[in-house]
Image (cartoon, rainbow, N blue to C red):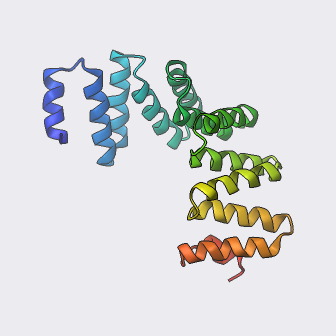
Amino acid sequence: MDLRALEKELEKSPEDPNLHYKHGLLLAEAGEGGRAARSWRRALEIKPDHTRALNLLGTTYLSQNRLGEAEQLYRSALERKPDQPQILNALALALSRNGSHEEAISLWEKATELDPNYTQAHYNLSSVLIRIGQDQEAQQRLEKVLTLDPDDIYAKNSLGQLLARNGEVDAAEAEFRGVLDIEPGDLYAHNNLGE
């Protein structure tokens, strides 16, 4: 359904939260984030437990660095769907950006227990583990990401930086060269190789 057709449906059924949710999706795809957020807020006015609207509005707020509001929305979504790895990951991001690393780590661990193949949660967890100096655990998470997706250049660059920091220069160089095999123009890999 295109945007115009959906807006006509909304005129007929202005109290349908799912139509407002879908309207927000179409607006977001069209690059109209502000209007999309208004549609998701409207969906939540009608149905406060609309988990998908809670999650997407939270993501909008997270991208705007409105961390407290994002956290509140993600917590509401999590109350309704406590075993949703994507919501756990999103809440952990908001908490981590707000400095609540311990709770964020716990949420990422739960997300990766629920979905062991959820590369983004493993990667996000590794980033915080690096930040707080838990290099060995971070390395294990990055290696897990690369087991699942050998072409993940972000994980390869992060692993390379971690290895270099810990004196494993040859292994680090191999990771950076691996990035360039996948993405020859990657500036981070070139920079890390001193090129």
Image mark count: 0
Towards the viewer: 138 or 95: 138
Question: For residue 33, what is the image quadrant?
Answer: top left
The residue drawn where x is 56% and y is 65% is: 151
Towards the viewer: 138 or 40: 138
Quarter of the figure with the N terminus: top left
Towards the viewer: 24 or 135: 135
Percent x, y of residue 171: 77, 71
Towards the viewer: 145 or 120: 145
Quarter of the figure with the C terminus: bottom right
| For residue 156, above or below residue 133 | below
The residue drawn where x is 55% and y is 34% is: 85
Question: For residue 161, what is the image quadrant?
Answer: bottom right
| For residue 136, above or below residue 192 | above
Question: For residue 194, what is the image quadrant?
Answer: bottom right
Percent x, y of residue 130: 77, 51
